[in-house]
Image (spheres, rainbow, N blue to C red):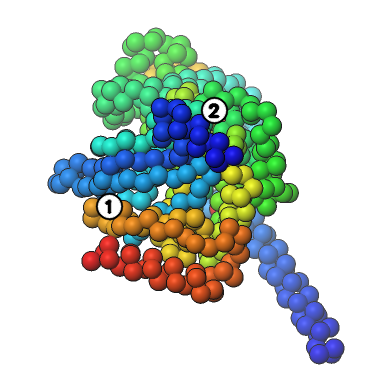
Amino acid sequence: MTTLAPDLSLDIAAAEAAFHRARQREVWRRRLLPAVGIGAALLIWAALVYGLKVPPFIAPSPLLVAQTLYGKIDVLMMNLVPTAIEAVSGFLLGNLTAILIATVFVHKKTMEEAFFPVVVVINTIPVVAKAPILVLLLGNGMEPKIAIAALICFFPTLVNMVRGLESVNPQAMELMRVLSASKREVFFKLRLYNSLPYLFSALKIAASTAVIGAIVGEWIGSTYGIGALIIQAMYNFDSAMLYATVIVGSVFSVVFFLVISVAERMVVRWQAPVAH
Amino acid sequence: MLAQDAVASARSPAVAEASAVSCRNVSMRFITDRRTVTALENISFSVERGGFLSLLGPSGCGKSTLLRIVADLVAPTAGNISVFGVSPQEARQKRSLGFVFQDAALLPWRTALQNVELPAEVGGFAGLPSGAPTPRELLKLVGLEGWEQNFPHELSGGMRQRVSIARALLGGPRLLLMDEPFGALDEITRDRLNEELRRIWQETGTTILFVTHSVYEAMYLGEEVLVMSANPGRVSEIVPIDLPRERDLSIRETEPFTRIATKLRNVLGRGTQ
């Protein structure tokens, strides 16, 4: 017994060390594999362009794109600013409207039944078809782009928000009744918190689609912005510029998405960590 | 004290005031597309102040529905209910009752302490009546001292149910309605919580209505057991539990306990035939 005990603790220490090594390896794997994947994709891209001798006006090599990104960064950034303003304004406008309408829908079922079909119909119109309509309505400034970005964010947030506000634990609802809580208290103490995880999954979708909306808006009769730059580069057969613009747009989308994810982690702190 | 109450109620016209809960010929029918279901038929019973009544019956006998009627969560199709001499609605609005649900129904975004504080924030009951136990004291009463700042997902099922009992006790309700609160817990936790609930009942003097489908739980906890039968839900019998007021779990191995258990099981058996 006395000889067994130290052996056992040694075994445990060894097992713990092995476990931590395995964990460490797993962490590095998760960090390295995406980088390896991106690297491989870039290599294949370069190999195809050089191997098949694709002319630069059809498709650029990764190196040429990198050079353009570096050399034309001022033009790219100057055009990113209006697109970012449109995307963020549209994001705020669309989501705030969706949250307000969801609140109305939850409290006035009649409104939901009457107007939800209208919302669905508007949502079925493709963005590329909505854009000309809004340009005619709102002119050539930033307004139609903001409107398109807002419209594109609106629908997923409305649907998710209504679900989040309504899918309250029925026993929690009964609890509020036993406590004689008012509708207002039920909303602010129960429904709103309940909707936050749903809202954030919609906001994460909206963060990337708002940028798409702004870019599509700029395709039609605009002289500035990422969207306009894409069209210009295409007409000029400046494929390197085209790719560089697309990359700048995507990076902005990713950053926007990450900001929302961080905000989510700061606000929704009560959920059990999801097991992988 | 009890005699005084009896004298007071004899003088006042509201005789029902003498009991905590009194149900007269309560019936409940649910109308669906396909048929009308009679969930409760002619239920009559009363619970005295400070009493502990267990509602025992098979699934679907309407015992939860009965509890919901007393809590003013649903309205009965017919019959009269009075809770401390007033309608369930008035009793609810006066905060005379606390309700403990089967799943603890804690708000996941609130810590244990914040969950217990909820009743003092809503329904126009800002703050606590003076002298009433504070949320911290109630968490201590249910054995959760030191867990105040934990979120529900960090607590075990038994601990969550303790939090919900503390929440139901906030503001000192005169009637505690419990709807199979320990049904989802393991037997060991359940036994411990049964013991604690008896202790809390004795310490607070709250009247308790406790729904369960466990014969042992019903009789270990209750001073009386109302046995129900299903289809339609009826009162089979109200069985007084002649056990000492001070009970611990070992009482379940004694002869009087097993004798009453046999009786309850016979009454239940009659109901299902």
Amino acid type at circle 2 is Val
Residue B2 location, x and y as percent?
A: 55, 41
Amino acid type at circle 1 is Gly
Q: In this view, does A216 lie to the left or right of A81?
A: left
Residue assigned mark 1: B233
Query: SS of the residue at dot 1?
Result: loop
The residue closer to the viewer here, B125 or A40, is B125
Residue at x 69% of width, y 32% of height: B131
- Is A140 situated above or below A170? above
The answer to whether one can see residue A185 in this image is: yes
Residue B157 location, x and y as percent?
A: 56, 56
Q: Which chain carries label 2?
A: B
Residue A180 location, x and y as percent?
A: 47, 29
Neighbours of disc 1 within 10 Å: few (<14), some (14-19), many (20+): many
Q: In this view, does B68 lie to the left or right of A21?
A: left
Q: In which quarter of the image is the C terminus of chain A?
A: bottom right
The residue closer to the viewer here, B99 or A174, is B99
Res A149 quadrant in image: top left
The residue closer to the viewer here, B104 or A202, is B104
How far is disc 1 from disc 2 in space, using C-alphas?
34 Å
Residue at x 64% of width, y 48% of height: B203
The answer to whether one can see residue A202 in this image is: no
Q: Which chain carries label 1?
A: B
Residue assigned mark 2: B122
Residue at x 70% of width, y 42% of height: B137
Residue B8 location, x and y as percent?
A: 50, 31
